Structure formats: C-alpha cells, structure tokens
Image (cartoon, grey):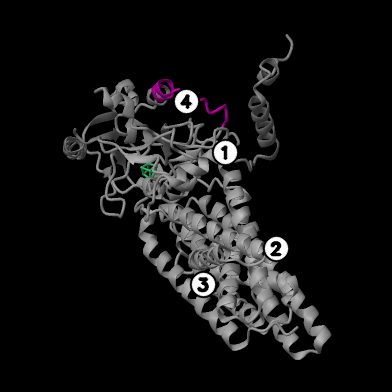
C-alpha cells in the first residue's frame, strides 16, 4: 500500500471552491450558513467541523506584477486549506478512545462510530483543524477520503480541482514534484514561492503540503507547529512531584499533630 | 418608482442581509467601522500580511468544553486530595472521625466526577468508549483509568465502612475497606493533579507554557479545597489540617506571584481581560486570603480563631473552584490569540 499525500499548489488555485463543494457533496457535510466576514471573498474563515476543505483568499499589499496586477491593485492569491495529516499528529496521540487512527495510506482518520466527543483532539491540534460538531457532539475533520482511497479513487477535492492545484499521489513523488515546481517558479521570477511542509518541527512533516508565496503566516500556517506530546514529560514529572509532596506533606502533618482538638 | 425592497425583507431567512445594510448605514454615517472585517467605503481593504496573519483570524480552535469540565477539575482535585488525607489519617491512626469524613468527600467525588464527564459527552455509552484502550501518551486516557481506579476504591471504602458501622464489622468488609482505601490512596495521588497535565499537554499557548507548574498548582488547589471541606465538617480545630491548609495557601500565593511576575505574552490571558480577573480572584481567594486568615487564627482567642478558620476554609474552597474556571477561560482567550501560534510578537 503506498503512502499518499496532497500537494496544494496555491500558485495554480483560482479560488473556485470546487474542492469545498466536492468535499461537502461526497462526505454529506451540512452547510455553514451565510455569514459575511468582510475578509476578501472568504466568508468561511477556517476549516472546521463542517468545512474540511477551505479556500483562503489571501489579499495582500500591492506588489507590482504579482498575480499579473497593475501596481496599485491589491494582489490576490488563493490557497485551499485542509487537515495536514501530520506525521506526528496531536489529535491522534491525544484521542482517549482510539477513534483516531493512522490509515494504511498514512492519513489521519477519525472513526465516527468510536469517537465519543470528548473534544480533547480539538485542543491538541496545532493547526486548529479538528472541531466538535455542536449538535452531534463528536469531532470531525478531513478523512483524506479514506473510503475513496480504499477503492483506488482520488480524494474528491483533488478530483474536482480544475487546475490541478490540488494534487494527490505518492508522498515521495509529490515532494519531488514540489521541488521541480519550485525550481520552475523561481526560474520564472516568482522568487517568493515557497514550500510548506514542517519537517523541522516535532510534527515531522505532513501529508498535506503546500506551495505558497512568501511568508506562511500570511496563510495562517504556523512557522513551527509542535505536537503537544512534547509537553508530556515535563507535565508528568510535575505530576509525580506534586503527588510526592502531597503524600509527604500529609504524612508529616498527621504524624506530628493529627488529633482534632475537640 | 418605489424604493427597492431590501433583500432581507424578501427572503425571510436572510437576517444577515439586513445586518449588512445596517453596517453599511453605520459606516456611511460615522466613516468608521468596528465590526470584524468591516470596511467603510474608500477605506483600505483588510490585508493578509506576515504581521497580521490571515486577517487576524485565530489559527487555533477554542476548547469545546463547557462548565462541566472545570467543575470536574474542582471536584476531582478535592476528592483525590481528601482520599489521601483520609487514608493517611487511618494509617497513622489518629482520628476516626477525620478518616470517615475524608472518605465521604472522596466517595462523593467518585460519583459526581463520572456524572460530570458523561454530561459533557452527552450520552453515558460514550464514556465506555474510553475504556476500550489504554494509551499512555494520552493524558485523557490515563486520566480516565485513574478515575476508574479512584472511583472504585473510594466508593468501596466508603460503602464497606458504612456497612460495618451499621451491621457490625466482619472480615470481608474489613478486606474490602482496606483494599478500597489503598486503591483510593494510590489513585487519589495522581487523580488530584493529572488535570494539570491534561490541559498542559495541548496546543493552547497559555496551557502548554505552564505545563511544568499546572500539576503542582492543581494539587495545591485540590488539597486546599479538601482541607477546607473537612474543616467545615467539624474538624476546625485539627492542627494537621491547619498546617496543610497553610502549606497549600503559601504555595498558591507563590503561584500567583509567579504568574504576575513574568512578562510573557503567553501568560497574558491570566492577567488581562475577563479571564485575567477571574484568575486574579481565584488566586487571591486561594493564596493570600486563607494564608493570612490562618495565621491570624493562630494568634487570636479560641472563639475568634474558630471563625477565622471557617472563613479561611470557605475562601480556599471558592478560590479552588474559581481557579479551575479561570484556567479554562484563559485557555479560550489564548486560543483566540491569532498572534502567538504564528509567532507574531507585536502588532
Ligand atoms: S492537522 Fe490537526 S487534525 Fe489534522 S492530523 Fe494534524 S493534528 Fe490531526
């Protein structure tokens, strides 16, 4: 079984949201309601329990020539966001029911029949992806179209994308593709094109990589996401110390003077 | 021609459209807008930049828990510490009454805790889903197993104690009581503080920044609450409880100073806004107030001393409860911070 990934190339995205629609249709997700955000044409804001693909509309200060714009116009890029399917996934580690598993394709999958809605994964995701559905109580996020992959199909978003901004395939091949694509973009003068795949942090890389322009923070992509298990050692050490102090202190207090002076 | 009918009136569901018209009118009148993402005509468009992130939309999701979970933190902390006090009071053999009352607190906590968790999950069956795995790397999983061990032990000890009081002692009852008590001690120790690890090992900045202190802080808070409850149950003259309450109060005062003294943007939710004031209120009631009252009670005459200790007990219990809510609120405020996860220092 090959290990798969997404490569989302924002330089090819036209902001049509076909991926969002395809995802909702295939997975039968409810609507998000109508809400005006005022942030460019992005009225969704972020991925969530009912939004597993989300197109960001990144409107920036005018850069002459960027996106083919005239000098005084705001530059506009789009990028389709998704669960990163982390190599070291905070949600998966935190899940107390074993509902969240790593699939044979390398993706991170929530088994909806096992999820009990404790919500702990929500606090453990360094990308703010997984969310609790308030009516249902359980946690939801991108499934990496596990059902489709199982029968050899591409995920719905990748299939619907008309510009191949969302590419799907074997992870090493996609990394190589990304490298070639970056070289090409740089050659064409797009100096700020960059590859986002945080292999240098405790997340140790993702199965949803991005080609973006400039600083990842502009896309709400954290420069160094950390999987929260790195805090466990310090926490349990403190817990053991606290238990020791509680035991010792209580023993001391009761041995020296335990009588209720009644 | 008549005026165009506003879209909001034509389509009854479109409340939003009406709101939009309102916002537009307001912007025209004042030339300024305070709504998120709003922009009066002619003003520059909101932009995504390395300094403002993606339109300042927070990256992280807020913790989805409601009041049940912080209340559980309080109940569990007090019950765990009470079990420890009760078991050790039994082993040192000083005061039967104290043992019994401590057991009652532990037993009450062992019943209330799972009820609160089930209330958060929505359905009792969902609690069982956590008993299908044992997962050391998940503090939630470890916590649930600790809860199961603690609850069984504390309930067994209290039940056996009750039966032997009522129908006279017997060997099996003694066994059950001893085994239950030993279990409630062994599990009570981690049970009183694991919730600190639980919230510490998350992606929420204000929580994970304090992961090394939270378990100690929560243990002291739980102990203070347990001691306060025992004092109010008629052990207001017990000097060991006084010493424990004093220790917890001094530790909590130090914890407050530590938070106030560090200028770290990660800790801002503990100092500013509503969550900041909740933290301060909880901190003052847990730390300096009971500490001073206890010290004063050591000086004063008998009657005054008893009432001062009662006040100290109430203050510590309220402080412990408020402190748990404060940390959860701070977690919410911290998750709404769009800067820290993107490593943006100042606007
Ligand atoms: S991005 Fe969040 S939800 Fe997705 S795998 Fe990583 S930790 Fe889990």
Q: Residue at x 30, y 55 (%)?
A: A202
Q: Which residue is mark 1?
A: B123
Foreground label between 2 and 3: 2
Q: Does the closest atom of ligand 1 sit within 8 Å of the Cβ of label 3?
A: no
Closer to the N terminus: mark 2 or mark 3? 2
- C-alpha gap between disc 1 and disc 2: 36 Å
> Toward which corner of the image does residue A4 lie, by quadrant?
top left
Closer to the N terminus: mark 1 or mark 2? 1
Near-viewer residue (A176 or B109): B109
Q: Residue at x 31, y 24 (%)?
A: A148
Q: Is residue A34 magenta?
A: yes
Q: Determine which of the numbered discs, if any, sits on residue B262 in the image.
A: 3
Q: Position of residue A200 (x, y in %)?
A: 26, 54
Ligand 1 image position (quadrant): top left
Do the CB atoms of the residues marked 2 and 3 lie less than 8 Å apart? no
> Toward which corner of the image does residue B31 lie, by quadrant?
top right
Do the CB atoms of the residues marked 1 and 2 lie less than 8 Å apart? no
Q: Which residue is mark 4?
A: A29
Q: Is residue A211 above or below residue A226?
A: above
Q: Determine which of the numbered discs, if any, sits on residue B194 in the image.
A: none
Q: Position of residue B310 (x, y in %)?
A: 76, 75
Mark 4 neighbour density, 10 Å: few (under 14) some (14–19) many (20 or more) = some
Q: Residue furthest right?
A: B303
Q: Quadrant of the C terminus of chain A?
A: bottom right
Do the CB atoms of the residues marked 2 and 4 lie less than 8 Å apart? no
- C-alpha gap between disc 2 and disc 3: 55 Å
Q: Is residue A228 left or right of residue B293?
A: left
- SS at mark 1 in the image: loop
* Span highlighted in magenta in the image: A22-36
- C-alpha gap between disc 1 and disc 3: 42 Å
Q: Quadrant of the N terminus of chain A?
A: top left
């Amino acid at each position: 079984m090959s290990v798969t990934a997404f490569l989302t190339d924002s330089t090819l995205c036209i902001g049509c949201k076909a991926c969002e629609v395809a995802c909702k249709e295939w997975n039968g997700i409810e609507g998000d309601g109508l809400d005006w955000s005022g942030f460019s044409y992005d009225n969704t804001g972020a991925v969530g329990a009912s939004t597993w693909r989300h197109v960001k509309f990144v409107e920036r200060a005018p850069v002459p020539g960027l996106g083919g714009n005239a000098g005084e116009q705001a530059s506009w890029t789009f990028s389709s966001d998704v669960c990163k399917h982390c190599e070291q996934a905070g949600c998966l580690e935190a899940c107390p029911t074993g509902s969240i598993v790593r699939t044979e394709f390398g993706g991170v999958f929530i088994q909806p029949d096992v999820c009990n809605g404790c919500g702990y994964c929500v606090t453990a995701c360094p990308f703010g992806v997984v969310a609790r559905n308030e009516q249902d109580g359980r946690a939801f996020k991108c499934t990496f179209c596990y059902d489709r992959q199982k029968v050899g199909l591409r995920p719905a978003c990748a299939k619907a994308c008309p510009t191949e901004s969302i590419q799907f395939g074997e992870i090493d091949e996609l990394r190589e593709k990304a490298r070639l694509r970056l070289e090409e973009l740089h050659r064409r003068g797009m100096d700020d094109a960059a590859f986002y795949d945080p292999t240098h942090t405790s997340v140790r890389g993702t199965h949803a990589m991005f080609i973006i322009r400039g600083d990842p923070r502009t896309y709400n992509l954290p420069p160094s996401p950390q999987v929260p298990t790195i805090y466990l050692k310090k926490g349990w050490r403190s817990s053991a110390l606290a238990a020791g102090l509680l035991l010792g202190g209580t023993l001391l207090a009761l041995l020296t003077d335990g009588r209720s002076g009644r | 021609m008549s005026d165009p009918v506003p879209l909001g009136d034509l389509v009854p569901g479109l409340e939003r459209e009406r709101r939009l018209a309102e916002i537009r009118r307001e912007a025209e009148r004042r030339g300024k807008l305070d709504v998120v993402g709003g922009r009066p005509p002619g003003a520059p468009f909101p932009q995504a930049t390395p300094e403002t992130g993606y339109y300042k939309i927070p990256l992280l999701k807020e913790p989805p828990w409601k009041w049940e979970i912080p209340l559980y933190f309080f109940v569990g902390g007090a019950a765990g510490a009470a079990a420890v006090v009760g078991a050790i009071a039994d082993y040192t053999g000083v005061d039967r009454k104290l043992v019994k009352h401590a057991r009652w607190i532990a037993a009450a906590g062992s019943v209330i805790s799972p009820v609160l968790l089930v209330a958060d999950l929505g359905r009792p069956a969902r609690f069982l889903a956590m008993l299908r795995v044992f997962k050391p790397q998940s503090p939630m999983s470890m916590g649930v197993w600790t809860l199961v061990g603690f609850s069984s032990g504390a309930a067994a000890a209290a039940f056996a104690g009750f039966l032997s009081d009522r129908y006279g002692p017997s060997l099996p009852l003694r066994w059950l009581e001893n085994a239950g008590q030993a279990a409630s001690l062994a599990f009570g120790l981690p049970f009183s503080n694991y919730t600190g690890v639980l919230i510490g090992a998350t992606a929420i900045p204000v929580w994970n920044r304090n992961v090394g202190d939270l378990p100690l802080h929560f243990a002291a808070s739980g102990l203070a609450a347990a001691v306060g409850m025992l004092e109010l149950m008629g052990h207001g003259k017990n000097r060991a409880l006084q010493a424990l309450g004093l220790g917890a109060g001094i530790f909590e005062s130090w914890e407050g100073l530590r938070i106030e003294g560090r200028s770290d943007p990660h800790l801002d939710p503990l100092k500013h806004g509503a969550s900041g004031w909740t933290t301060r209120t909880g901190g003052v009631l847990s730390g300096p107030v009971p500490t001073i009252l206890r010290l004063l009670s050591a000086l004063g005459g008998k009657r005054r001393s008893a009432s001062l200790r009662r006040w100290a007990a109430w203050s510590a219990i309220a402080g412990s409860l408020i402190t748990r809510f404060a940390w959860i609120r701070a977690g919410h405020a911290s998750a709404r911070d769009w800067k820290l996860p993107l490593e943006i220092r100042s606007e």
